[in-house]
Structure formats: structure tokens, C-alpha cells
Amino acid sequence: MSRARLPPLVTGISPNEGAPWTKVTIRGENLGTGPNDLIGLSICGHNCLLTAEWMSASKIVCRVGPAKDDKGEIIVTTKSGGLGTSTVSFKLLKPERIGILDQSAVWVDELNYYDMRTDRNKGISPLSLRPANPLGIDFDKGKVPLKDLENMFPGMSGDFTSENFSATWYLIENHSSTGFEQLRVAVGNLKKQASKKNEGSLAYVKGGLSTFFEAQDALASIHQKLESDGTEKVEGSMTQRLENVLNRASETADTLFQEVLGRKDKADSTRNALNVLQRFKFLFNLPLNIERNIQKGDYDVVINDYEKAKSLFGNTEVPVFKKVYSEVETRIEALRKLLMDKLLETPSTLHDQKRYIRYLSDLHAPGDPAWQCIIAQHKWILQLMQNCKEDFIKEQKVSVGGVGLELDRSLALNKISLSAPVKRGGSFQKPKDDSWHYKSPQQVRFVEKLSDVVISQLPNFWKLWISYVNGSLFSETGEKSGQVEKLKKNARQRQNDFKGMIEEVTRRLVQLVRGALLPSSLTELQLRQYGGWDTKTPLSGCWLTQVIHTVRLSHEALSGLEIPNDLLQVIQDLLQDLRVHCLLTTLQHTEEDVKRLAKKEDWVVDNEGITSLPAQFEQCMVQMLQSLKEPMECKPGEINILNLDVVQDKACEQCVSIMKVFIKCLEQLSIKTDGDIDASHGSGLSKSFSFSLSVDLASPDLFGSIKEDFNSKPEQRLLIILSNCQYLERHTFLNLAEHLEKNGFTTAEKIIRVSIEALRQLDEYLFETYIEKKSDPIVGSLEPGIYAGYFDWKDCLLPTGVRSYLKEALVSIISVHAEVFTISKELVTRVLSKIIEAVAEEMSRLMQCVSSFSKNGALQARLEISALLDAIDLYLTSESRSSFKQALEALPQLQSGADKKLLEELLNKFKSSMKLQLNCFKPASFQPVKR
């Protein structure tokens, strides 16, 4: 039978490549006259007739089957045209493995993938459905032992489904020898998988869009037929039966896949939960980590984690995240409270305070933690100062005996020079001898302890404020964030408040010291708060010096912090008052010491005729000035207190009082009775002779320098005191004037002038007293001696020599000379001249009272007056010469040469017989050896 048509010819196919079951449209010529005419269709060698749909003689639609060849022709066979040809080809892509739970736009032949007979009752894990080769390239495993991989990657795994998956481990284990190009292909595969995963359902819908349209067309066609039949609401109709069939199919499908779908949903939920936990494990573990780090004190870690969580989840709307984040906020709030408690806790170091403030700033704590810390530290310092005072007051009340009694001031003075120095800003170093601490008065120990408290606390308090003002308290790096700038602005606004705090601390320090040492400078109300000390035994000058030293060190330490001087002015005022108080107290105590010098008089004189009393007085004054050297010294910022008129007047008055007290001591010593002396010195003196270290070889008595220190006669004591007065005026007071000027006493000249005037008054009084005691007996013996034996100047025998009364008078004068010479050679001339004046005056009176002289009487009178003049010529004064001249003028003149010759012979006889006695009236031929 001959053919009516030409063979089919395929000239086009769309798409020209695709996976199995891809729907394609074939176009060409002579593709058949109808559906029944189409008897064969193959693509790449696979029969596709089952799915073919003849549209026209030039168009056929079908689905590509799973062919063996990757690329092949499209062959159409018709009854009318026979076996056709193709001018195009179709490329069959490698089909992707579709899991039983994966979405697919076409029906999948499950027999090609799963053995239903062996897996019918076996559970399928969702993880098992993942690709075994995620890179999509051939494995090229090396020979690296598993043990070596475990050592190289501790705690990791090469399983890409593991939570601790290590990509490096996986590549070493499975692709150690794979080339670089292959690895690049693997990267492309991974990117494709990631893009498909991201496309999700959209890619599924896009790929099966034609299937959806076919389904839609089928449903529309069914609906149209049902409407035309009018049987959609009839019982037992085709629609009802179709519905029942579909429902049973759905129920059967649900029954078949319920278990695996349920497990899939559960696995998906678990996997999603695990993914969420893994992805956001930082947030979920944060509350527990915060607790642990707080317990360990790792606040920096907590703050960093909180800042990270706040930036990530602070504004989240996810309920789970909000719940966990609220728990984090609860922990952080507890941490804020903990840090605030630690910040306000006392005592604490400056480093800890700065650290806690920075933590609270980073945690955005409400309020101003730094200022709260400053307020707390201020109250703490004030409380420490008050507690220090109360502790010493209690100790004072319970102390018994001499624990707090004052030591001897000279010993204390030595202790001050040996006391340990104090470093700036540091605490006071105590001497190694702890007993010294307990022997010092309580007020002194209180000031040291109080200063120690201030020096140890106030520097950190000041540094905390400086850090607060410059912002370094909130940021170590100095970054200028908005919060830091705001806090710095708050700090600048509180400068006056902080200045008030410093003023209160320094004022409290000053008032507490004043309450202990200068109670008179406080009001009654202030005394009730800062007083309470036992002031019955006032502190000596040396202890006040120690206090001044302590306060100065405190001021120096605080000045080193660059605290403004106006805030430390109250301490300067305290120092000035303490220095004045120390000066006046030292002068008062020196006056008391000088009063006691009289008890130390031993009446032992040296070769210069003075006792140790002037030296003791000078030493006492010099020690006083030495003890005042440190208080009187002007440190930076201090003034010379002696330039203050009031202080200068008081100091001058007190110094004059000291001088007068010593002069009064000399006066009291001069009028002491022997009983008083025995009572004062008898217990400490032995009835033996005390030898001076030098002996005046010119003295008539080689033992004249021997001094008796017991039962001194009142006249001898007068001479000793006169000698001391003379030495004081010529040496001691001048030395003291020089010392006073060197130590800043501008009124030294006035002090010495007034003192010398008082000393001269005492000297004059004592001298007159001594002369009266010594001259009266001599003068009183002259008249009775002259007229002894009823002697008459008118009727007397020719003179044979000087009569006894004159010799006795000379012996008495010699006795006075010896007494004075034994005490002080410098007083001999002064004393003898005054006594001879009295003798001369008396002789003049007696001669002038004689009415007339006989020749022998005149010769006798002239002999005796001449003998007296010749003996005491060395000690004659103008007054005594005038008196003797008047006496001689009252005598008749000698007329004959025989009388003159006799007078001369008798005078020579007198000098010869009295030569030894009269030697005392001769000048020394050489000076004694000075000690």
C-alpha cells in the first residue's frame, strides 16, 4: 500500500535539555493527522508515547523519560508517514535524587530509589536523607590515621552532620589528594546547593508550573462536565464517588506517611530548635555565664557579654529571646546593686573604687555612682576622725597611774631629735622602741593618729575627685562618649560641693586638734563636740614641738596633692596658733625650771669666783631656744610669729619675767639661813673639802682656793652671789642677748637692758648689805681703840709705834680681803675700797672732833694715819683720799726734823713688823693659772 504522506520531520524542541520527566514541546512537519495516527515517539532512545499528547500536525507535547543516553534525537512515527527523522537533538541532564519527603512537580518512580520491600517497616531518619557527598566530587581519601586527626583537631569531628564539624578535618580525610580544579568545582556545587535551599518552595513551584496548569485545566474540565450533567448534587453521583475515592486516597496516604511525616516534623522541630540554640547559644547561656563570672569576679567579661546581648537582642520581638533577655536584665540589675554595695563599702582602695565606678558606668547604672562614692568616702573620713578622738578619750578615762604622765622635758627633747621621719602622703613611722609610744602623752599620740588617718585617706579622696572631674574615672582610653561628657559636666557643677567637703575635713581636723591642745580657742558648743580632754597637766614645749612637726607634715602631704591653698588655710592658722602656744608654754615652763635652779646651787666656786648657777641658767635658756628652733622656723606659707606685735610683746614680757625670776632666785639665796641651806643641800653634801682645779700661787695662803661647800657663812654667800651677778652682767646676759637675736627675738636688747637694770639693783643691794656687815665692825672699833686706856691727845707720851687698834683694824681689813679674795679676786678692789672709804671717813671725823693735839699727840696721830695710808694705798679712792686729807689737815704740822725722822723710823718699824700681813695689800706679781 502506498503512503499518502511524507515521513515526520522534527525541526525543534523546547526546552532542548532537561532532567527526566521534563515536559517538552516538539515542533516539525508531518507529525500525524491525529492522536490515533501517532504510533511512536522516542527521545534519546526512551519511548515517550505514553505521555505524548498530539496537538497538531506540527506540534506534539510530551514528557522526557529516563533514557540511558545523555543526548539523542527525537524520532516520531505515524501510521500515515512511518518512521520520521530529526534535525535537532535533546540533552538529558543527570537526574537529582529526590527524597521521599521532597517536593516534586512530577511523579517519581520510587522503585528506582528505594526498596519498598526491605524498608517497609524500617524508620527513616531525616539525617539519612542528606547527601552523602556534599561537595559533589569524587572521594580521594588519603592515608592519614584517624588517631592523628583526633590529636590535630581535639574536640572536633569530620562528620558534616556533627555539631563540632571541622571542614579541615573533612577535606584531609576525604579529599587529601584532590586537585585544585576539582575543589573549585566542589565550591560551585556548594553554592548551587545553597542557592536552591534559599529558593525553597519558590523553586519547586517554578519548576512544576506546567503541572499546576494541567491540574487546573483538568479540574476546570471536570467541573464543566459536572455542570453539564447536572449531577453534582445527586446522591451516588460520579462526583460523590470521586470525592469518596479522593478522601480514601488521602486517608490511606496519611496512614502510610503519618509516622514518617510525624517523625519528620518532630525532627524538623528538634533540628530547628537545635539550630536556634546553636546559633543563639550565647544568649541562652548568658544568664548562667553571668552568674558564674560574677562569682569569679570577672566583671569585665559580664559587661562585655551584656553589651553584646543588648546590641543584638535589646529590641527583639521574639518572645523566647525577650524572655531570656529579661532574665539577663534581672542578673545585670543584681550586679549593679552588688557593685554599688562594693563601691560604698568602707574601707576600700582607690583602685577598687575606680574599677567599680567604671563598671557601673559601663552598665549604665542610674544616678551618679562616682558622686555617691565621694559622699560615702567623705562621711567615712569624718567618722574615722571622730572615732579616733572617742577612742583616745575612752583610753584616757580608763588609764591608771603614770602611763600618760609627761616625761622629763630634757629627755623628751632628745627623743624628738631621734624620732623617725615621716614620708609625704604616707603614714607616720614609729621609733623602734614601742615603749616610747606609750610614754608619750595621749594628746600627742592622738594628733599623730589623727594626722595618720587624714594623710592615709584624704589623698585617695582627692585623687578620686580629680579622676571624676577629668573623666578618666569612666573611661581608661579617654574616649569622649556622650555619657562621659555628661558625667564630666555633672562633676564640674559639683565643684563647690566637693570644696565644701574638703573644707569640712580640714576644719574637723583643726577643731579636733584645737580641742585637744587649744581648748581656749573653741566656743563652748565646739568644746562639747571636740573637747573632753584632761588638761590638768598641760603639755610641755617639747611635746608641742612634736605636735607642730606632725601637723606640718600633714600640711606638707596635703599641699603635695595640689589642693588649693585656701582650703588648707585653716591648717596654717592652726599651725600659727600652735607655734605661739608652744613659744609661750616653753617660756612659762622655762620660768618654772629657772625657779628650781636655786635648789641646785652648791656654793662651789671656780677660780673666777662664780658657781655653776650662771652656767646652769645660760644652759637652761639656750636649751629653751634650741627647743624653740623648730617651732619658730618659718616653713613655706608660714609667717614669723615674732613679727606679730601681740606675740612679740608677750614673748618679751615672758623673757623679762624669766630673767627677773632668776634674779629673784639669787636674792632668795642671799637671804637663806644656814638651816635653809642644810635643808636644801645637807642630804646631798658631804662634809669634806672641794678643791678647784687651779690654785692662785700669789695668794698669801696657798690653800686659798680650797672651797668649803658646807655651812657657808651668809657673808660668803653674799660674795658668791655678787660674783655671780658680776659674771651675769659681763658675760651671761650678753651671751643670751646674742642667742636671742639669732633666734629671732627682735626685743633682745630690751630684754637684756631691763634684766641688767634689775640685776644691778640686786647687786647694789647685796653689795651695800655686805659692806655694811663688814665695815660697821671695823669702823665701830676705831674710836674705842683710839681712846682705850683713857688715851688723851693733849697729854700723851712720845710715840713708840703704831698702836694696837690700828693693827686690829688692818687685820680685820686683811680678813675681809682674804674672804673676798678666796671667793672672787675681781671683787677685792671694789669691796676694800668701799670699806676703806668708811674707815677714812671715820678717821676724818675722829680727827676733826679732837679739840687740840699736843706735840706727841699730833705725832702719834700722823704716824697712825700715815701707816694706814701706806698700807692701803692700793685701794684708795678719791673719796677716801679726800677723807684722809681732811684728817691730816686737822693735825698740827711737824716742825722739827727730829720729829720727821722719828716718824719715818716708826713707819719703817711698822712696815717691818707687819710685812707679812701687809703683803695682801700688794699687787700680784704674776697671774694665776686659768682653768
Image (cartoon, rainbow, N blue to C red):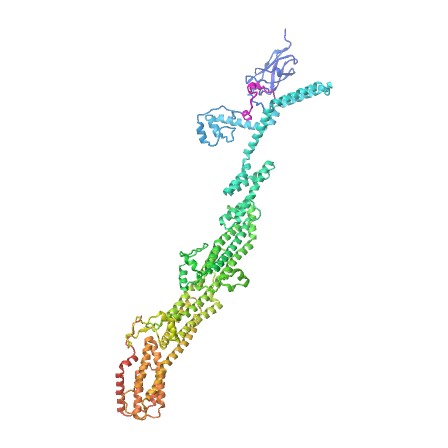
Q: Give residue 400's quadrant in the image.
A: bottom left
- For the residue pair 697 and 784, the one nearer the viewer reads as 784
Q: Is residue 750 left or right of residue 4?
A: left
Q: Give residue 660's quadrant in the image.
A: bottom left
Q: Is residue 124 magenta?
A: yes
Q: Position of residue 716 (x, y in %)?
A: 35, 76
Please determine whether, in this image, residue 859 is positioned above or below residue 279: below
Please determine whether, in this image, residue 847 is positioned above or below residue 134: below
* Picture quarter with the C terminus: bottom left
Residue furthest top in the image:
1
Q: Is residue 501 visible?
A: yes
- For the residue pair 630 and 134, the one nearer the viewer reads as 630
Residue in the picture at 44% in, 31% down: 151
Q: Is residue 290 magenta?
A: no
* Picture quarter with the N terminus: top right
Extent of the magenta region: 105-130
Q: Is residue 869 visible?
A: no
Q: Position of residue 261 (x, y in %)?
A: 59, 25
Please determine whether, in this image, residue 760 is positioned above or below residue 741: below
Residue in the picture at 54% in, 55% down: 501
- For the residue pair 59 and 274, the one nearer the viewer reads as 274
